[in-house]
Image (tube, rainbow, N blue to C red):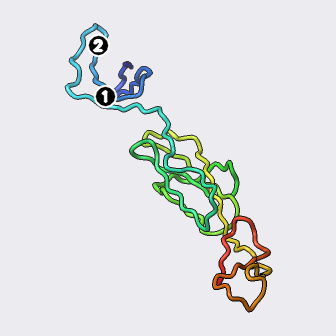
Amino acid sequence: KGSATATAGTVTVTSNTLSPDGTYTFYANASDSAGNASACTSFGLAYTLDTTAPTVTGLSNSATPVQSKTWTWGCSEASCTYLFAVDQASNTTPTGTYASTTTATQASGNGTYYIHVIAKDAAGNTSAVAHYSAVLDNQAPGAPSSLSLVTPASSPGNNATPTIQIGGVSAGDTIGLY
């Protein structure tokens, strides 16, 4: 799997290209210029080749407006660290120091917010940036602007469940009558 000529008591040998990903065990022997070869080492050195990038898991887009959003993520491999950023840009690439953090919260604001996450596995392979969105709405609607009787048409009346028309409201808002 590789060879080099020793010039002292230790030597560095670069192996031949390994493929596919997996665990390889290296053994060593020595041979002299006359062609005499030693036995292989009785012990091996295990090395796991991992060239596969992890993927970020556990995130999805959320179009339903909420007041606060907490994202939680993981990765497709047993042990990952992460870079992440939360902002209102759809294509940010997070920077900084990788850490084990797997949650982030956006607790205020209005509009679409994005979480951007990169995973790095134990071998140093990094994922593509994962971008996911959530809609935050922390602005109360305006107060209704008018109230009028529908049934009965006027007060006083003998209807125990009067119907009231409320004006100045927005589609989708839940209107309460108190």
Nearest the eye: 141 or 130:
141
Q: How far across and how far down the image is residue 71, in percent?
A: 53, 58
| Residue under label 2 | 32
Say left or right for 46 vs 117.
left
Q: x and y percent of residue 34 in the render?
A: 28, 7
Answer few, some or many: residues within 10 Å of disc 1's Cα (few below 14, many 20 plus, some between 14 and 19).
few
Q: Amino acid at mark 2?
A: Asp
Quarter holding residue 33 = top left
Query: Measured from the top left, where is residue 154 in percent x and y?
Result: 78, 87
Q: Which residue is drawn at the image coordinates 75% and 90% (left, top)? A: 155
Q: Residue at x 23, y 20 (%)?
A: 40
Relative to 43, 119 lies left or right = right
* 42 sits left or right of 9 in the view: left
Instruction: Depth check: give the residue in front, 30 or 102.
Output: 102
Q: Tell me the CA gap for discs 2 and 1.
A: 14 Å
Closer to the camera in the image, 62 or 173: 173
Asked whether disc 2 touches disc 1, contact meaning CB atoms under 8 Å apart, the reply is: no
Q: Residue at x 74, y 82 (%)?
A: 152
**90 left or right of 107?**
right
In the rendered image, the vertical position of residue 159 relative to residue 109, given as above or below:
below
Disc 2 or 1, which lies upstream in sequence? 1
What is the quadrant of the N terminus in the image?
top left
Quick check: 80 above or below 164? above
Tell me the kind of residue under disc 1: Gly
Dot 2: element = loop
Q: Mark 1 highlights which residue? A: 9
- Where, quadrant-wise, is the C terminus in this rendering? bottom right
| Extreme-top residue of the structure | 34
Residue at position x 42%, y 23% in the image = 20
**From the viewer's perspective, is residue 151 above or below residue 54?**
below
